[in-house]
Image (tube, rainbow, N blue to C red):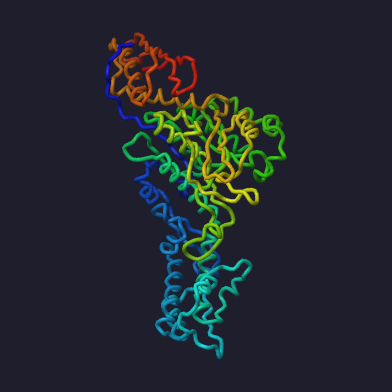
Amino acid sequence: MIRGMHMDLPRIPFTILALAPFSEVSEDSFSPEIIGASLDTLDNAIDSLASTLFIPVSKDLCPAGILPFKPSGIKDFRPQAMVKNIPYLKSLLDAKEFIEQAGPKGLSDEQIVRLLQEDWPDLPLDLTIAPGEAPSQPEESSAVDDLLAMVAVPGGTGAEARSGKGGARAWKGQVGSLMAKLLEIIFADETFRLTEASWKGVETLVRQGPVKQEEGIALNICPISRDVLPAAMDSLISSLADDMPNLILIDLPFDNSTPSMELLKKIADFAATLLVPTAVWIGPRFFHIQNWNELKKLPYLKHYLEDAAYAKWRKLKEHPGSEWLVMTTNRFIIREPYGEGNPPRTVFFEENEPLWISPVWALGTLMAKSVVKYGWPTRFTDYRNIALSNLAVGPFGGKESASTETVFSEERIMQFVESNITVLAGALRKDSAFIPKEATLSGASLKFQLFFNRIIGYLFSLKDEMGKSAGDADLGARLEAALAELFRHTGHEPPADISVHAEQAEPGERIPLRIAFTPPGSILPTSERLEFSLAW
């Protein structure tokens, strides 16, 4: 190897490609759309990619029967933004504010009713004034009265909520009750939850990575659905061949069904063709249980997965592409469910369950953190230094709390790892999560695959810089110097045994390269010498 040869390296960020349900996509007219996202451009990405969701609601609550929701930034997923940005909710908000101000202005109930009917004729409010009822007094209600008037009381009926008896205070309560019910429906809508969870995953990655413009990590995102994923992969294989990512995240859940296994096989083919580690996720349904509380019913996981029901799963593990496929499990939360523990800033409503974020986003975030701290993604299991932090903490197991969907015992975590499933681990009463062990589906080291992908991608990027002339006698030495510079550039001592041998080739043909070196222990804790061939 030629010592002391300095080279100007091309800027090659660690690139993550995320495929997720960021917006609704049509199977008939689908074409992959990829854009970059960073801490600086997250809102631009949402504005560009997110489609309008049409959330169905009862016409008793909204005469149109739908609520259109089109986010243009991450804050638009908050209730206080929705009541300003969704036209019907904005009408309710305006009506409520009018009623609040009518009392101090000295308006009578009759005047309030007339103006409400003139300015908001479509609102489903019962504005009947009971015979002989005393006029509403100017606002003298206490803060507690106002709060009670706006709370959607559990078990209350729509008729009770819309009762007009009581004048201005009751009418304000009607509007508050309508707003609460509509927000409850929005945050329970499956399509909305998928969309929010995907964008919250992006937010976690770009904030905690972090992913910033003009720095060492790049995130590209592409909206997909389960139905269009096969077509997306077919299209992306050709477009990514010359711009290979270093990690692919697919935010879709998989179980042990035949359709899931068939799609996972296609993903494995996709990952192997690109030589890119590709992460997906599984939940309790993969194990034929309804939730993680039922996991205790299962025996030793490796033995359980030897059942005939998992024959296709075991066959998938033997697929050549399984060396590039990563199965993750255990979701996490970054905000508490709206309710008593996290009261909304609008009207009070409650979510039935937390908004769970896929563990593939945790994996991507931890690798980004590793790149920022160590220059390479391979230290992502160094949980004393690399972990998700400042997560939300939700209720767990009755009186306890945690940031992950469940808290596995150390024994169970090792059973998952032995089954080649990578676990996001949480702890009781902690707002953090980490990945203690890793493996690809085949059982191969994910860290090694990440390292090898980075080396291959780097060498490919040098072709335009260095050319591929068969007559270049210095090609091997120049590549040795380039590899050494890569390690120095990322803060590590280059291997002393880097060897690149360029064989002779006919003019116009690719040059066979034989490359060998021992990866630095600071990047990849192995003493095994890496040897591979490459056509230049």
Q: Quadrant of the N terminus?
A: top left
Residue 48: horizontal and vertical position, in percent?
Answer: 37, 49
Residue 230: horizontal and vertical position, in percent?
Answer: 50, 37
Q: Is 439 rendered above or below residue 359? A: above
Q: Is 485 rendered above or below residue 288? A: above
Which residue occupies the foreground of this view, 502 or 227? 502
Residue 34: horizontal and vertical position, in percent?
Answer: 39, 41
Q: Is 427 rendered above or below residue 62? A: above
Identity of the residue furthest to the top in this view: 504
Q: Is residue 314 visible?
A: yes
Looking at the rendered structure, the number of numbered marks drawn on it comes to: 0
Q: Is residue 233 visible?
A: no
The image quadrant that residue 40 belongs to is top left
Q: Quadrant of the C terminus?
A: top left
Question: Which residue corresponds to the image point at 48% horizontal and 30% vertical from the top-left?
Answer: 277
The image quadrant that residue 466 belongs to is top left
Which residue occupies the foreground of this view, 279 or 30? 279
Which residue occupies the foreground of this view, 123 or 329? 329
